């Protein structure tokens, strides 16, 4: 019975919803209990997804129709293929450890009940996207994810910057979602169905460009792709576990997952755009990470770079590679963020990397895991990141996409540069502030997750893929790796190794030259300022303040003139004028009963007219 | 029961409606006017149920459930408005509430 697993999926999907409701309703004041309750739920889900991953072989499908509007059927259902199984496992597994980390990290927070309820509702939403079998359900959970992200970014809602960042994230996502919902409408119009399986059958080889382009808008917003990437770096205003879970490992990857799911709807033009813009963003964001002193912001740019690489893989026509990179990235980036959280916690909430330093001795476990994850991030051979990232670079080379390949090579170099810089500034050298001087290792609830995620998965997820990911789901990984001729003499490996030696080594040396200041800023302030400046934010500000405001004012003027002026005032005034001043006084006596009488007379006249006709 | 026909039901509904309408037109206390309004609405739903019964379908009867639900919500809003009006003006007489005339 291949469909026997649907009840398991029910549990996986609805357990977090129940947990969220319970926490939000009853545990607002019992923070400690809410924390452990939510964490226990998360681990249960992780266990169940592991069971699903290990035991189910075929696709799990389950569907119930919610409404039927003429020919159109709207439903709720599951479609769990190999990609979805892998994604389910990665999301729930990473999330479970992040929950445990949060128990330690949020120890002193007064609003823990709200925070963990938010984490649980986020779990529900993201798992909904993963299992959804139709576009409408995806969209609903997509919006739920947006909402929970908004809620968690604004956890410190009394801080202005957090409130502003949550608003920015939400609005930017809404812009993308407008395209998404138009794309859904277009699919419905063209194919008459929203079901993924039926869509695939109906779509055929030649899909209009507009379908893919509109659906891609949702991906641009959620996965923070150019030009809607501006919200992600601001989203770091949320607590660090939130950054790790939502804005690095899972939510932003949901866009990639979704694009892989509807890859049959993407026309070649859309794919080319994704490939080139993804690669371009990867290179640019990697360089921008060099000009950030806040450790979380620097990691956020790194996430942007990796999302660009995933988008690029999709564009190159390798959705399975994109999903693989998403999984690997989830492991090492979650570790990096949690490690950053541990560092921030240890340094008494200091986030400025220039004020850290020498933490290797004071926080050995955190340092070891952070460095392991960094090496994975830099795609050191046999580390998790190497398998997926180099495969993508290889795919660009084999596909003869020279511009994409060049951008990816720059991205690889930039990755090594900012990684080396981060390691050098945070963990090596001398302590640069009082806080770093008195840093202490974090409690076990924080070090255990980063140890598991960092040392086991960020390092070995790719190497041990055959053991960690059972055969039933290996088709994703295998298809990714065997479809390319993967070897040590491949251009991607050579580029990667060169980037590693010169980038990582160079950064370690270069950033050791100045203490308490950024070496690049000292050497070339102009280059630093160029990278630090937020060009797109400036562009948006100009556009909204300038042209868009003019357009809005013009429309407001039309509204005033046509609706208020001509339609309401003119007709109302004209009618009174036509009937004379006298009638105005006769009718409008201010007596409710008088008006009621007129209504009755009018109704009777209307009834008489209709009956007599 | 066998002798009751659709016409009887509709006559009753019509009477109720007329009663409500008269109340709306002649009474001055807004609270009473409001009750009369509800009476008119009920008369309409009664007609709906009668049609549903004699056409041997459930559509009208089901529809009435929705009307009753919405009417309940609407009553809550209306009563709240009347209470608020009384607190502010000290009166719910319709002929005293004529400030919009000027």
Image: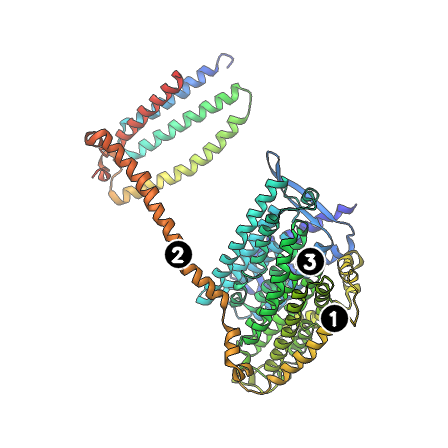
Quarter of the image containing the N terminus of chain A?
top right
Question: Disc 2 versus disc 1: distance between alpha carbons?
Answer: 49 Å
Q: Position of residue B86 (x, y in %)?
A: 28, 41
Which mark is drawn over residue A432? none
Residue count near mark 3 (Cα–Cα under 10 Å), binned few <14, some 14–19, many ≥20:
many
Determine which residue is flagged by label 3.
A87
Where residue A96 appears, x then y in whole percent?
65, 63
Chain where mark 3 sits: A
Q: Earlier in the sequence, mark 3 or mark 2?
A: 3
Q: Secondary structure at mark 3?
A: helix
Q: Does the image show residue A44?
A: no
Q: Earlier in the sequence, mark 3 or mark 1?
A: 3
What residue sits 45% from the left and 15% below the top?
B7
Compared with residue A49, is residue B39 higher up or lower down, i.e. above or below? above
Residue A255's x, y, as percent?
Answer: 61, 57
x and y percentages locating residue A592 in the rendered image: 27, 33
Write down the quadrant of residue A455 in the picture: bottom right
Give me the disc on residue A549: 2
Report whether mark 3 lies on the same chain as mark 2.
yes
Mark positioned earlier in the residue sequence (2 or 1): 1
Label ID, residue A491: 1
Q: How is the image coloured?
A: rainbow
Which residue does the image show at 49% across and 68% down from the upper left?
A535
Q: Foreground: A333 or A223?
A: A223
């Amino acid at each position: 019975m291949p469909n026997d697993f649907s009840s398991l999926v029910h549990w996986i999907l609805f357990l977090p919803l129940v947990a969220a409701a319970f926490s939000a309703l009853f545990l607002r004041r019992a923070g400690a209990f809410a924390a452990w309750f939510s964490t226990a739920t998360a681990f249960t889900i992780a266990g169940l997804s592991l069971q699903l991953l290990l035991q189910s072989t075929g696709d799990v499908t389950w569907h119930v129709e919610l409404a039927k509007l003429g020919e159109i059927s709207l439903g709720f259902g599951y479609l769990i293929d190999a990609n979805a199984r892998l994604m389910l496992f990665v999301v729930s597994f990473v999330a479970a450890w992040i929950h445990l980390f949060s128990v330690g990290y949020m120890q002193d927070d007064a609003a823990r009940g709200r925070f963990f309820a938010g984490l649980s509702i986020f779990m529900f939403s993201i798992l909904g996207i993963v299992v959804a079998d139709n576009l409408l359900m995806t969209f609903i959970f997509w919006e739920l994810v947006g909402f929970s992200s908004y809620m968690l970014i604004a956890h410190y809602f009394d801080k202005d910057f957090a409130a502003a960042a949550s608003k920015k994230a939400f609005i930017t996502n809404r812009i993308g979602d407008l395209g998404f919902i138009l794309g859904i409408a277009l699919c419905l119009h063209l194919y008459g169905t929203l079901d993924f399986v039926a869509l695939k059958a109906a779509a055929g080889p030649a899909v209009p460009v507009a379908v893919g382009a509109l659906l891609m808008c949702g991906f641009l917003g959620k996965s923070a792709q150019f030009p809607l990437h501006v919200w992600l770096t601001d989203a770091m205003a949320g607590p660090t576990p939130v950054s790790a879970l939502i804005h690095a490992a899972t939510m932003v990857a949901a866009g990639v997952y979704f694009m892989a799911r509807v890859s049959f709807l993407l026309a070649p033009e859309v794919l080319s755009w994704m490939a080139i813009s993804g690669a371009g963003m990867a290179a640019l964001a990697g360089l921008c990470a060099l000009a950030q002193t806040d450790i979380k912001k620097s990691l956020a740019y790194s996430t942007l770079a990796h999302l660009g690489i995933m988008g690029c893989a999709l564009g190159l026509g390798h959705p399975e590679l994109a999903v693989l990179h998403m999984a690997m990235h989830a492991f090492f980036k979650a570790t990096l963020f949690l490690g950053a959280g541990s560092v921030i916690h240890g340094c008494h909430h200091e986030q400025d990397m220039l004020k850290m330093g020498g933490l290797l001795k004071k926080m050995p476990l955190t340092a070891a895991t952070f460095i392991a994850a960094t090496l994975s991030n830099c795609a050191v051979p046999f580390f998790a990141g190497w398998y997926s990232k180099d495969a993508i670079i290889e795919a660009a080379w084999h596909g003869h996409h020279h511009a994409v390949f060049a951008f990816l090579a720059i991205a690889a170099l930039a990755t090594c540069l900012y990684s080396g810089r981060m390691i050098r500034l945070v963990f090596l050298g001398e302590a640069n502030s009082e806080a770093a001087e008195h840093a202490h290792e974090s409690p076990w609830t924080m070090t255990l997750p980063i140890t598991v995620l960092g040392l086991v998965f960020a390092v070995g997820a790719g190497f041990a893929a055959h053991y960690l990911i059972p055969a039933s789901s290996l088709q994703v990984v295998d298809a990714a790796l065997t479809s390319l001729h993967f070897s040590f003499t491949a251009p991607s490996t050579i580029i990667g190794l060169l980037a590693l030696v010169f980038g990582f080594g160079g950064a370690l040396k270069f950033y050791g030259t100045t203490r308490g200041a950024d070496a690049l800023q000292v050497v070339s302030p102009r280059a630093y300022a160029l990278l630090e400046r937020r060009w797109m934010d400036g562009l948006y500000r100009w556009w909204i303040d300038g042209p868009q405001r003019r357009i809005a004012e013009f429309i407001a003027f039309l509204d005033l003139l046509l609706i208020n002026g001509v339609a309401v005032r003119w007709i109302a005034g004209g009618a009174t004028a036509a009937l004379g001043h006298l009638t105005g006084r006769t009718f409008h006596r201010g007596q409710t009963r008088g008006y009621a009488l007129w209504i009755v007379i009018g109704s009777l006249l209307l009834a008489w007219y209709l009956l007599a006709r | 029961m066998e002798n009751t026909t659709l016409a009887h039901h509709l006559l009753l509904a019509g009477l109720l409606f007329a009663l409500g309408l008269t109340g709306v037109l002649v009474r001055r206390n807004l609270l009473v006017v409001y009750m009369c309004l509800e009476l008119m609405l009920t008369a309409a739903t009664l007609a709906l149920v009668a049609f549903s019964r004699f056409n041997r379908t459930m559509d009208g009867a089901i529809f009435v459930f929705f009307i009753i639900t919405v009417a309940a919500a609407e009553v809550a809003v209306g009563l709240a408005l009347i209470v608020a009006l009384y607190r502010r003006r000290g009166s719910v007489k319709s002929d005293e509430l004529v400030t919009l005339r000027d």
